[in-house]
Image (cartoon, rainbow, N blue to C red):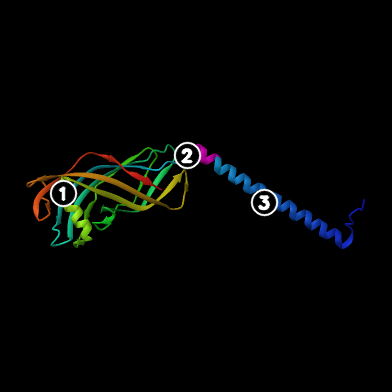
Amino acid sequence: MAIKDCGGHKGCECERDRLRRKCCAALLAFILLVLFVVFIVWLVLRPHKPKFYLQDLSVLCLNVTPPASTYLFTTMQATLATRNPNDRVGVYYDQVDVYGDYKGVAITVPTRLPAAYQSPGDQAVWSPFLQSMDSVQLPPVLAAALAQDETAGYVLVDVRADGWVRWKVGTWISGHYHLRVNCPALLTVNDGKGSYGANTGGGTGYFRFQQAAACSVDV
């Protein structure tokens, strides 16, 4: 069996090879250790998505008169409650916008919620006003669908929140994660003039929010 000659210049090359192998092994061991620590921390903390609930939706105004017009003007006030279900993880809410949506079309401009920090197990309530500002032109099909829903006595509106959150564990704060919230609001439509005097379909009527509902949350 031949014996590898590591003398002279070749000996220096062999030594460098051994050093490179040791460095690579040390680097790999360090990466595995970091991944293991991150995995253990994740198992211990297990951060959960914040929970959102739509407690109320007051329709102050809703004007649309199809088929002669497909323009809609609306003013609503939503009451959103959120709870941080984590025991050791805090949540920063950064740049969260809330708006009204009907069948995938935004019917109000986004309203920015105040930036907030929610400690573990804490709760918060926001009551933003949602307005269309200028009238929104609905596609004719949606305007007709809204008129049909009002005639049937039920209108389903979605209150959506879109923004960014960060997690806080001790003194460590994560990067931003995209927050998407969808809260369905079932409204009943009653003939005559109600407490809010909302106008619908060229006549008068009012909307009543049925019950508090849990929201779908995606982070």
Residue that appears at 37% across and 37% down: 121
Where residue 70 sits in the image (x, y, percent)? 17, 61
Q: CA distance from mark 1 to mark 3?
A: 66 Å
Query: Residue 150 got which mark?
Result: 1
Where residue 82 sits in the image (x, y, percent)? 32, 42
Query: Residue 27 got which mark?
Result: 3
Residue that appears at 59% across and 46% down: 34
Residue that numbered label 2 is attached to: 46
**Which mark lies nearer to you, 1 or 3?**
1
As shown in the figure, which amino acid type bears the numbered disc 1?
Glu
Label 1's element?
helix
As shown in the figure, which amino acid type bears the numbered disc 2?
Arg
- Whether residue 50 is in magenta: the answer is no
Q: CA distance from mark 3 to mark 2?
A: 28 Å
Residue that appears at 32% across and 51% down: 161
Instruction: Indicate left or right for 3 with 42 as reference.
Output: right
Q: Are marks 1 and 3 in contact (CB under 8 Å)?
A: no
Label 2's element?
loop
Q: In terms of secondary structure, what is the magenta stretch mainly?
A: helix
As shown in the figure, which amino acid type bears the numbered disc 3?
Leu
Magenta-tinted stretch: 40-46
